[in-house]
Image (spheres, grey):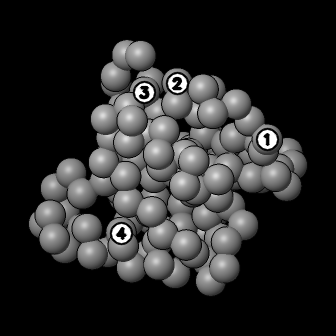
Amino acid sequence: MRRLIAEALRKDGYEVITVSDGGRLLVTLAHQFVEKDGVDFADLLLSDIRMPVCTGMQILEQVRAANWQFPVILMTAFGDAATRNQAQTLGALLFDKPFELSELRTAVHALLGRGR
């Protein structure tokens, strides 16, 4: 699924960085932050909730604790009301799997201010 989404977003003209787990995601975010001096280092974070090392929700909590306000989209096949509420409280969109790729792409475009 990661490859499919990345390929679709690249076709839409976005630069996409993919990682395989939550730990690598944290390292990548930190690296991008340092490399770009904290300026526009991320436009959007798209993550599954269930991942090895760190969950997407834990990463979202840390991103918000650091006052990083870029948009976040989380995906899960195990969503419940509490998960949805937590994501919304932290300012993220939550997609329940399975979902239509076109709906995800539309959400990405809307969050980044690009029309389709």
Residue type, mark 2 in image: Thr
Q: Position of residue 95 (x, y in %)?
A: 69, 40
Q: Are the residues tagged 3 and 4 within 8 Å (C-beta)? A: no
Q: CA distance from mark 3 to mark 4?
A: 21 Å
Residue at image location 58% in from the left, 56% down from the top: 2
Looking at the rendered structure, the secondary structure element under dot 3 is helix
Can residue 84 be seen from the camera position used here?
A: yes
Q: Position of residue 72 (x, y in %)?
A: 50, 47
Query: Against 41, is 34 above or below?
Result: below
Task: Give the label on residue 106, or none.
Answer: 2
Can residue 69 be seen from the camera position used here?
A: no
66 lies left or right of 6:
left
Q: Are the residues tagged 3 and 2 within 8 Å (C-beta)? A: yes
Residue at the extreme top of the image, as rendered = 115
116 lies left or right of 41:
right
- Comes first in the chain, label 1 or label 3: 1
User: Which residue position holds label 3?
Assistant: 109
Q: Quadrant of the C terminus?
A: top left
User: Which residue position holds label 4?
Assistant: 29
Residue type, mark 1 in image: Pro
Q: CA distance from mark 3 to mark 2?
A: 5 Å
Q: Position of residue 64 (x, y in %)?
A: 46, 59
Residue at image location 52% in from the left, 24% down from the top: 106
User: Which residue position holds label 1?
Assistant: 98
Looking at the rendered structure, the secondary structure element under dot 1 is loop
Q: Position of residue 93 (x, y in %)?
A: 60, 40
Q: CA distance from mark 2 to mark 1?
A: 16 Å
Neighbour tally class for label 1: few under 14, some 14-19, many 20 plus, Cα within 10 Å: few
Neighbour tally class for label 2: few under 14, some 14-19, many 20 plus, Cα within 10 Å: some
- Comes first in the chain, label 2 or label 4: 4
